[in-house]
Each structure stands twice: as C-alpha cells, then as structure tokens.
Image: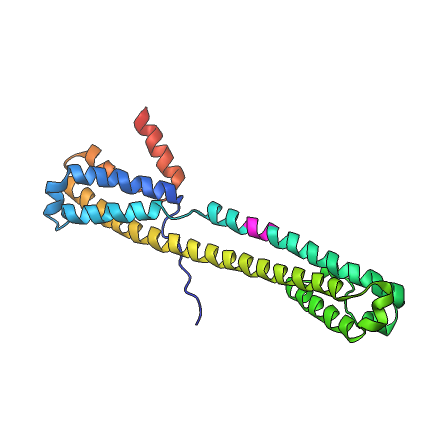
Amino acid sequence: MKKQKFNRKHNYPDADLYLQCIEKLRAAHTDRKHFQQYGYDLERMKKFKAMCERFSKLPGDDELLGDQMILTEKKYKAADKLRSAIRSLMTRVEMKFNNRTGRYRKFGAAKLGDMTDAQLLFCARRVIRVARQQIDFLADVGVNENILGRISTEAQNFELAVNLQQDKVADRDIGVDRRVQQGNEIYDELIVLCNIGKDIWDNKDKGKYEQYCLYESNNEQKKARKEKGK
C-alpha cells in the first residue's frame, strides 16, 4: 500500500504556527461570550489548546535528524571494522594466491570501499564460506576460525547498526508526517477561530478585528508585528 503523503497547509515554521494559535486563543478567550453565539464554546477552546500543546511537544526534524546522524556514524564505524576484518583475511589469502588468480577472486573482496551496505554484508558471508572450504590449505598463512569468527562478529554488528539506522530513518519520516498532519489539524481549527473573530468585529473594532488576521508567511507576520510596534 502506498504511503500517504501529507502537505503543509501553512507557510511558516511550526513554532510560529503554535505561537499564532496561542495568541488567537487568548483573544478568543477574552471574547468568549461572543464566540458562544457561534457555538464555539469554552470547551472547544480548551480542546484546541490541548491540541496545540501536544503539537508543541512533538520532536522537531532537527532532533529526529540528529538521532539519525548518530546512528549513521555508528554504522560507518561498524562498516570500517568489518572491512578491516575482511582485509586481514584477504592479506593472508593474497600471500597464498596471486590477487589475479581465480582462487583469489573467488572471495569477491575487491573494491571493499565502494560496496553498498548490502554488498558489504554479502561479501562478509561469502569470504567466510569460501575460506572455510579451504581452511586447511590456508592454515599456513594464519587463516583459522578466530580470523573467520572476527569477520562473523563484525558482520553481525554491522547488520545490527544498519537496521538501527534504517529504523531511525523511518522514525524521522513518520515524525515529519505526524508533525505535518497535526499542524494541519490545528491550522484548520485556527482558521475557524479566526473567521469567527473577524466576523464578530467586522466594521465594529478595527484593532480587535486585526487580532484575528492571519498571514500567509512568516515574513508577513513579522512585518505586521513591526508595524504594531511603531
């Protein structure tokens, strides 16, 4: 099933969306008697405020990206350790076979640094299997179960690191969608609240009317606040 993609309905940062909601809710609470005439009561305001608070506590993308980067760094370190273990084996194999022979190439360990995560794991399993098939023949260059055990251990550690990193990538995707979805929900409610507020004060009180005006972008919002401060 194709993943549903959520698109943001507002053009300013989530922090500014939250701030606008709180500001408009504060104005609406002051005008709550008027709002009740539209069926927008105090209980609905409380529910809206609770939605905003839940939204503000969601981890931001920087936080989620940071977690992903930490596990990506751990994956890189695990990959380096696995490559080192494989190279240790291949140094011994090269002592036994010329690196242009079929016996050497059978290990498939060329270009370790260019391999994808999946290719590196596949390579680790292959070199263990191929080395075991001729371990007696390679014993005189130091190939033994300890050498192969090191590769196996580092491969397991690397596979775990890959899985954990991929989990964090998925967590970030889910987190972004959750923030967009909840942000859209409170933005929709904000629109309702502001439309009521503007209708209440239209042609009655310009200052109060402007309290319920929304801006299409964060830049417009900042300009409006600057004008009010003059």
Q: Is residue 183 above or below residue 208?
A: below
Q: Which quadrant would the N terminus be assigned to in this image?
A: bottom left
Camera-nearest residue between 86 and 209: 86
Q: Which quadrant would the C terminus be assigned to in this image?
A: top left
Q: Can you see residue 7?
A: yes
Q: Residue 37: image x %, image y %?
A: 9, 47
Camera-nearest residue between 122 and 62: 122
Quadrant housing residue 205: top left
Q: Relative to residue 31, is residue 7 drawn left or right?
A: right
Q: Residue furthest bottom?
A: 133
Q: Can you see residue 215?
A: no
Q: Residue 120: image x %, image y %?
A: 68, 64
Q: Residue 43: image x %, image y %?
A: 16, 48
Quadrant housing residue 128: bottom right
Q: Residue at x 69, y 58 (%)?
A: 82
Tell me, yes or no, whether the highlighted magenta stretch contains residue 72.
Answer: yes
Q: What stretch is highlighted in magenta?
A: 69-73
Q: Is residue 115 above or below residue 212?
A: below
Prevalent SS, magenta region: helix
Q: In this view, does 32 lie above or below 127?
A: above
Camera-nearest residue between 3 and 12: 3
Say how the picture is coloured: rainbow
Q: Which residue is drawn at 28% across and 43% down?
A: 21
Q: Relative to residue 101, is residue 15 drawn left or right?
A: left
Camera-nearest residue between 9 and 174: 174
Tell me, yes or no, whether the highlighted magenta stretch contains residue 42.
Answer: no
Q: Residue at x 12, y 51 (%)?
A: 39
Quadrant housing residue 163: bottom right
Q: Which residue is drawn at 35% across and 37% down?
A: 221
Q: How many marks?
A: 0
